[in-house]
Amino acid sequence: MRRFVVFALLVALVVGLGPLVADAQSTLAEIKKRDKLIVGVKTDFPPFGSIDAAGKNVGFDVEVAYEFAKAMLGDPNKIELVSVTSGNRIPYLQSGKIDIIIATVTVTDERKQVVEFSDPYFLSGSLLLVPKASTVKGLDDLAGKTVAVVQGAIQDKDVEQLQPKANRIKFGKVSEAVLAVKGGRADAYAHDDVLVLTLVKENADVKAVGKPFMPRPYGIAVRKGDTDFIKWVNAELAKMKQDGTYDRLWKKYFADVESNLVKP
Amino acid sequence: MTPAGAGFSWSAIARGLPYLLEGAGLTIMISAVAMVVAAVLGLALAALSQAPGRLARRLVAAYVEIFRNTPLLIQIFIVYFGLPQLGLKLSPFLSGLSALVFYAAAYNTEIFRAGLEAVPRGQLEAARSLGLSAPATLRWITVPQALRISFPALGNNLVSLVKNSSLVSTIGMVELMFVANDISFNNFRTFEIYGTTAVIYVLLVLGLTRLLRAAERRLLRAA
């Protein structure tokens, strides 16, 4: 019995301390004081965030992060990139491990309740990745089949809604979902169109099928209530669109899949 | 101003608990099966390592070194993602189960081997001089004593097994850890959900240690 009391007291203590963590108010000031911007980016999501052969972070989101560090602190290298996944990126932000998420976050109503979103900077639908020999042509063919999705990604709910007869199997990372398709563990893998198109370019044994479904915007996210910071982000995004930086990055990363994309 | 995500939410726990308990059901099931199989396999391999001749001993040693010296996560991935490429496609449950069994059995083998070797030689010699055959000596003299000696260490390993079973969440098995991720990735109440999950693991392990203590008392009484 005493064991339980001690345990309960410990829980109560930690619960009591919870609200002290992650004060949303002063992120902008805190970054300037620290003289370093800490950004959550993806490392398994080309062409937005991945690791190149030399071990460097590359991708559209990564370059936006460098632009932000340059604009805020005068040096693109005053930055720390933290690898996040669809599942853990919002918890990372909430717990103060990162200042900002630039990691293909689709804007949804649920997420709007817990983070502050910037203006949209990309528009993405979803596509299916299937083995080269597959006869699957779209969501309609997936009744009774197994569909891989990434935990925390919007496709988990989309597939549940659009093809309730499919069996969803969930993985933590993009690479594991791709492996599942290649190894015959899943008949298809549903994720953002631009990711699927890029994966198909890099993997000869799979193909992209279907018409992009449920297109929705990506937003950059900061902690809920941090309006100063999100205003700064929006101003910076507008500037990047005006001075041609956005177009340059678009061409660099999306030129070869552009015909399938919707430009915001 | 406090961010909207802050504060403690009991309702998040209330909403998540039924799903977490459902996940705990699979955790209990896969752990229980793995425990029994790993204990039997471990004892069998430990006995085999006592057999005369070097070959058996070396094979057992090789098995132990391979499975004890690689991370469990890699073993799970090899069985689940790797073996299908060689034509062996086990279900997710069997993939997770077999990785857990081989990993835990490697430790059990060492635990039982230590127990077998700790039985005084005189016991063996006495049994043989009374006319017991080698298998009968093993069954009636060595193993019962070795079990008693090994029991505390075996219990530790079984507790580890319950906690290690959380790794099968990576291959889409809907057990306790998987459900915890799934809920918190959607409602973002990480503290409440992982905290509740931790409490459930504590309760599971407390239940297991009680069972083990009862079993140990029984073993001692039988002596």
Image (spheres, coloured by chain):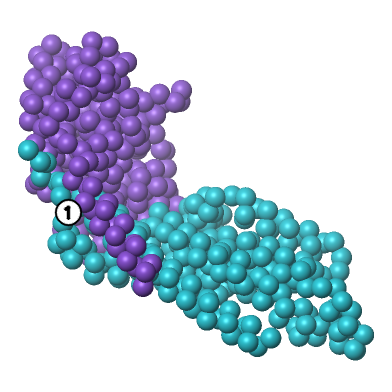
Chain colours: A purple, B cyan
Q: Find residue A227 and report its horizontal and vertical position in percent.
A: 7, 30
Q: Which chain is disc 1 placed on?
A: B
Task: Determine whether the residue tagged by mark 1 lies in a helix, strand or loop.
Answer: loop
Residue at horizontal 16 percent and vertical 22 percent from the top: A29
| Residue A183 vertical position relative to residue B152 in the rendered view, above or below | above
Residue at horizontal 29 percent and vertical 60 percent from the top: A9
Q: Find residue A221 and report its horizontal and vertical position in percent.
A: 16, 34
Q: Find residue A42 and report its horizontal and vertical position in percent.
A: 31, 34
**On the image, which quarter does residue A246 sit in?**
top left
| Residue A46 vertical position relative to residue A140 in the rendered view, above or below | above
Residue that numbered label 1 is attached to: B8
Q: Is residue B120 among the parts visible in the rendering?
A: yes
Q: Could you tell whether A245 is left or right of A133 in the image? A: left
Q: Mark 1 belongs to which amino acid?
A: Phe
Which of the image's four quarters has the C terminus of chain B?
bottom right
Residue at horizontal 35 percent and vertical 45 percent from the top: A173
Q: Nearer the viewer, residue A208 or B46?
A: B46
Q: Find residue A233 and report its horizontal and vertical position in percent.
A: 13, 24
Residue at horizontal 28 percent and vertical 15 percent from the top: A76
Mark 1 closeness class: few <14, some 14–19, many ≥20 residues within 10 Å: some
Q: Nearer the viewer, residue A234 or B154?
A: B154
| Residue A227 vertical position relative to residue A232 in the rendered view, above or below | below
